[in-house]
Amino acid sequence: MKYFKGTIYGFPASLLLAAVLLPGVLANSLPSHTELREALKTVVKEENGGFGFQMWATVVDRDGAVKAVAFSGKDRGDQWPGSRVISAQKANTANAFSLPGFALSTANLFSAVQPGGSLFGLQESNPVSPEIAYQGPSEKIGTEKDPMVGHKIGGINVFGGGLALYNNEGRLLGALGVSGDSSCADHNIAWKIRHRLQLDYVPAGVSPTKDDNIVYDINAGVSASGWGHPQCSPEAARIAQELPKTHPVRKK
């Protein structure tokens, strides 16, 4: 590269270096397939309170178009095949029902969509496009050329694993969806990936910590807040409750 008084092709060298070393640091940028896959592979190796299975992850932009699909295993068959589309559903849902000033995770929606809940029926409102979900050659699934990339997948999912993505300017760029383990572990993994990508400048939410963390307040089938999610395991719940300290959302 040619250097011109501290710049590279007209851009500050320090900014470009930061963009290389810190995914998501540039305004308006969503993670590439490589960045998403590396973050997913790293986080899956951690203790997340689930079965320790391999995972799928999908990122959509603010219009709901798929930007990247990745898996953590060596081959596409190392993860539950059905979780590829579920991860896309989760990304679509978190994007579709979050706002520039207010984030809802897919985990936050569980109680609200149950019979008698304030959002009952929401899960039927925006179906997945099967033509987009299952088109194309199988060997491209989970690669940079995944057949869903560039298309609007649709779909609504109402259990843990989907989170909105906010950059360092507080701008809502889209969302991340993760699937392949218990829904509670999926949430923990998605949270850690978002934190690793530095796209967690969450403005507000319904959790006790005023963000979009999973809420465990269901007793005798009723959520005290109306935004509760079932507990999958004590370990997954413990990890989630510690996330605001171990992986706190950032402030712009």
Image (tube, grey):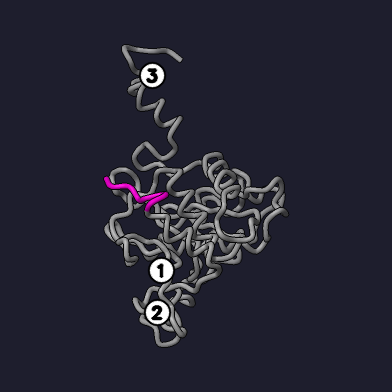
15 shown above or below 32:
above
Residue at 59% over, 50% down: 44
115 shown above or below 248:
below
Q: CA distance from mark 3 to mark 2?
A: 54 Å
**Residue 215: mark in rendering:** 1
| Badge 2 amino acid | Ser
Q: Is residue 158 left or right of residue 223?
A: right
Residue at 34% over, 76% down: 225
Classify mark 3: residues with Cα within 10 Å, few (<14), some (14-19) or many (20+).
some
* Mark 1 or 3, closer to the camera: 1
Q: Is residue 24 left or right of residue 151?
A: left
| Badge 3 amino acid | Ile
17 shown above or below 147:
above
Residue at 51% over, 67% down: 155
| Badge 1 amino acid | Val
**Residue 139: mark in rendering:** none
- Please report whichever mark, 3 or 2, sits nearer to the chain's N-terminal start: 3
- Please report whichever mark, 1 or 3, sits nearer to the chain's N-terminal start: 3
Is the Cβ of the residue at disc 1 closer than 8 Å to that at disc 3?
no
Q: Main secondary structure of the magenta part?
A: loop
Q: Is residue 141 left or right of residue 179?
A: right
**Residue 223: mark in rendering:** 2
Residue 91 visible to an observer of this rendering: no
Element on which disc 1 rests: loop
> Is residue 144 located in the magenta-colored stretch of the structure?
no
145 shown above or below 103:
above
Q: Which residues are magenta?
A: 245-252
Q: Mark 3 highlights which residue?
A: 8
Q: CA distance from mark 1 to mark 3?
A: 46 Å
Q: Nearer the viewer, residue 219 or 110?
A: 219
Element on which disc 3 rests: strand
